[in-house]
Amino acid sequence: MKVVLSGVELDNPVIPASGCFGYGYGMAEYYDIDILGSISFKGTTREARYGNPLPRVAECSSGMINAVGLQNPGIDAVISEELPKMREKFHKPIIANISGFSIDEYVECCQKITHEEQVEIIELNVSCPNVHGGGMSFGTSPDSVAEVVRAVKRVITKPLYVKLTPNVTDIVAIAKAAEAAGADGICLINTMLGMRINTRTRKPVIANTMGGFSGAAVFPVAVRMVYQVSKACNIPVIGCGGVESASDVIEMMMAGASAVEVGAANLRNPYACKEIIENLPKEMERLGIKKLTDIIGIV
Amino acid sequence: MYKRDIYKVIENRPLSAKTMLMVLEGDTQYVGSAGEFVNVAVEGKFLRRPISICDYDEKTITLLYDIVGEGTEIMSRLPLGAELDILTGLGRGFSEDKVCQRPALLGGGIGCAPLYNLSKKLLARGIKPVVILGFNSSKDVVAKEMFERIGAEVYVATVDGTMGTKGFVTDVIREKGLECDYFYACGPMPMLKAVCNTLEWSGEVSLDERMACGFGVCMCCSVETRSGAKRICKEGPVFMKEDLIWK
């Protein structure tokens, strides 16, 4: 089940997605998290952020909308407090998810995190749709994605994966711009911009009005975009969006993903990743797959 | 420590037009105190339903819940013997060992639920709580007899005055001149705000908010407190009155 992301070997392709697993140690109360391929930790910014007002979540058919607004303790507290606690429970490669509101902020956060032990990949969130004037603007234009990738690449020593928003007209153009600017890989998709209305109160369900739609419902969109991007680019792709089962992981890899992130499924079932990892060998056998690396982009 | 397990519905009956009582049989070893909650997976719904524990013993968990939407509607139609996937041991409950003489237990609507197990725990310590339950109307009143049966001193307030004191739980305290030295409260946010702002006694309140995970990873239920941002599902749902910021 081993896979490789830019020279970083993972025991298996299953990675809890940023924002759906905290810093991992909380989930270690449920199971031994060392069985995971990697963990993408909660998105981190330069300063501590409280995030958006409540309510921050709305349910949908086969999914949910969230507008947490990048609540996090800030990069310094992540390094001094969260990472040490994470390393106590997790001894595999860590993916550091970094967000920002300016190029300077991305650069400063990446500069600080790149030398951290066990952080093997930096995942740049250029796509969070929740923050006014924030990440969204970088992820929706090829030029701004390229600009932030170039700036960050200058200061880091670890592979850089850019996590893209699906809320664009041409995902391939954005991915190619990231690759040309020096990105080592692409992760997609982040959440899709969505909205729910409480018909009784005649108001949006979440305080932020709009939020990021995720869960099983977005899986076909994610598969499609992973397929398009992996065909157009020559760097690895991490597939993310609506993955709930071992079968979904295999489908995502057939579309072109070298590894797979699992997000919202963890929130309903805290054992989601554990169950997927346990079921993968059975599913591989059923489908006649000897090595997962054999099926990457086979479609 | 928390646990996911399958529980069997052994009771599921209406107490009023909108409030149901459900008893579940299964492993309760991870339930540690009054005021904790469970997160119930409902067939066909993406997110779980967080519901506070009304009572528990070695083998059963009792829930009181209002039918407020599709998820709780589905729960209300579950037959006896149905199985439910539930996370237990969630949240930090009330301080059951608080040193006090005469605590007031203030429940607004379905917020009365977690006060029941708390009452039992206090009575077992020889402390007789004053239980004040607030509802909109007499037809909504539930659990009054449950509290009376275990020996609590019970008062009721209704907004329309159709039972007990007309008004809110705070009006009962004023009207009856009740002297207490501590309070525990659970109910809608406006009620909790009023309780915290008008009562001079120290106390603790259980907050309710939309949640996604219920076990501390999604950050959907964070509140700002005097000691920083806290997760209602993890550091809460019970917070000290002094720690809360009311806007």
Image (cartoon, rainbow, N blue to C red):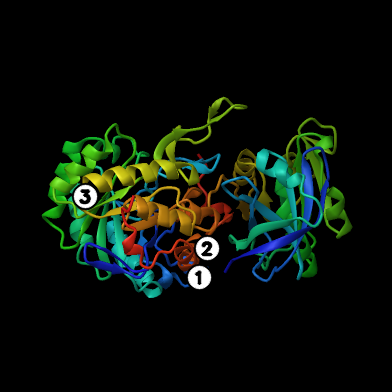
Do the CB atoms of the residues marked 2 and 1 lie less than 8 Å apart? yes
Q: Quadrant of the N terminus of chain B?
A: bottom right
Residue drawn at (40%, 64%), measured in percent from left and top? Answer: A289
Residue type highlighted by circle 2? Tyr
Q: Which image quadrant is residue B130 in? A: bottom right
* Mark 2 and mark 3 on one chain: yes
Q: Residues within 10 Å of mark 1 (few under 14, many from 20)?
A: few
Say which residue label 2 marks: A271
In this rendering, would B49 be left or right of A283? Answer: right
Q: Residues within 10 Å of mark 3 (few under 14, many from 20)?
A: many
Q: Which numbered dot is residue A31?
A: 1
In front: label 3 or label 1: 1
Say which residue label 3 marks: A106
Pointer 2 or 3: first along the chain = 3
Q: Secondary structure at mark 2?
A: loop
Q: CA distance from mark 2 to mark 3?
A: 32 Å
Question: What is the x, y in percent for residue A275?
Answer: 51, 64
